[in-house]
Image (cartoon, grey):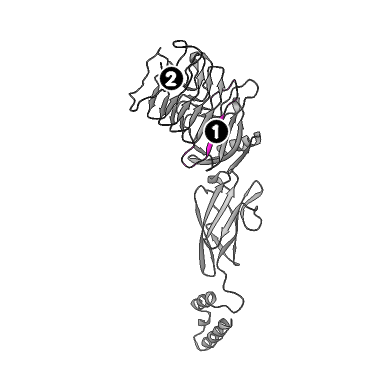
Amino acid sequence: MKTKAVFRALTAVCCAVLAAGSCGNPWMEKVVDPLFDDGTGPVPVPAFEAFYFDIGGKHYGAGDGALAGTGNINKVTLTVTVIVPGTAALHSLPAPVTAAGPAGAVVSPAGGTDFSGSRTYTVTANGLSRAYTVTVKQAGLIGDGTYAAEDELRARIAGASPGETLILAGTFPVRSGPNSIFIDKAITILAPPGGTLTFKQESVSLFYGKVFEVRAGGSLTLGGAGSGSMVFEGQASYSEPFVSILKDGFFTMNEGVTMQNNTTHSAMAAALEIRGTAVINGGTITNCSANKGGDSAPIYLGSSDGGITGASLTINGGLITGNFGVNSGGSIMLRDDANHFLEWNGGTITNNIPNHYTPPDGYGSIYIQDEFPFDIPNHTHDIDLHGNTAD
């Protein structure tokens, strides 16, 4: 259109009769440029042209030079989304590499490394500003059942910030012995909605291993509302529990989590070894067995410090079924080494097999060794054993 050219000509005439300097009136230019088009297009609106992170020599984000499929710049909603590897810690990313237009555009603030939450970046040019909301997400791990996937899992947990939620998918073998995964900070692990996450416990040589060991000050939460299925699979023999909770460690098991098919042939637990605090809100523990006298059970409460500090287990829901033992409890054992705490508010324990014998040689769903006193509070809900014997 010629409207802009005509307007500029009229402006030039006006400038001839106005005081010197008024021709470059900035207000006039700001009005003219966005509103009129002489065929060359309106003044460009400030915008991001590229936004990415250089991680390991690869560019994760959007724009020229970025890996395809790792980010998006939306100039309508003024948002930038970047997907970084699952091993990258969102709170300590490298400073982003940015490019913005038109020529001379300025991006503020410069840099930034903590993207554990959304950040705002502003692009300014031609007297105009546009504020973009930048969100960085971690890619869900795809476990292919190889040790490479296990190594990536370890790296991601090690790089997670306290309180972070990790969404994982696929199958992850976890090698035994010193290769167990140690939790020393608050971590939540979820499976993606509609997806499945499997931890497959494996032994190497004669070592015994567990998938997770929650250490003092650490907190591990598994599963939750809206997440997918999480499965712990044990091997046929000589295994430790799936999760071991040490003194001053905290563990929570929610809906969607299944622990199954683990057998221990030593003085160990088959599913959970609790020397700290554990809460079961949901999920299933099934077909886990303990074959070492009165020193083991599918769920085992013991002490980490010679009987000074007892363990705590609260059961609010879930299903514990089909577990068995030889000369041991069919489900839960409170060992005689400390004053332990067991509170049952809901859930079901059913069809657990004490052993091949009858009491007192074998024990039922809940076995309390009585050499030392225990602190077992009055329960506010009934315990329905469904025909199992509890001693």
Q: Which residues are magenta?
A: 222-241
Residue 309 at x, y percent in the picture: 42, 22
User: With respect to residue 16, does 110 lie above or below?
Assistant: above
280 or 317: which is nearer to us? 317
SS at mark 2 in the image = loop
Name the residue at 55% across, 17% down: 266
User: With respect to residue 135, does 157 lie above or below?
Assistant: above
59 or 147: which is nearer to us? 147
**Would residue 354 be seen by someone viewing this image from the given angle?**
yes
Name the residue at 62% across, 28% down: 175
User: With respect to residue 109, does 262 lie above or below?
Assistant: above
Left of 182 or right of it: where is 368? left
Q: Residues within 10 Å of mark 2 (few under 14, many from 20)?
A: some
235 within the magenta span: yes
Residue 355 at x, y percent in the picture: 50, 15
Looking at this view, name the residue that lies furthest to the front. Answer: 387
Query: Of the residues under marks 2 and 1, which one precedes in the sequence?
Result: 1
Contact, mark 2 vs mark 1 (Cβ under 8 Å): no
Left of 145 or right of it: where is 292? left
Q: Quadrant of residue 385?
A: top left
Q: Amino acid at mark 2?
A: Asn
Residue 69 at x, y percent in the picture: 63, 52
164 within the magenta span: no
Residue 111 at x, y percent in the picture: 55, 54
**Label 1 belongs to which residue?**
231
Looking at this view, name the residue that lies furthest to the top. Answer: 361
Q: How many marks?
A: 2
**Label 2 belongs to which residue?**
388
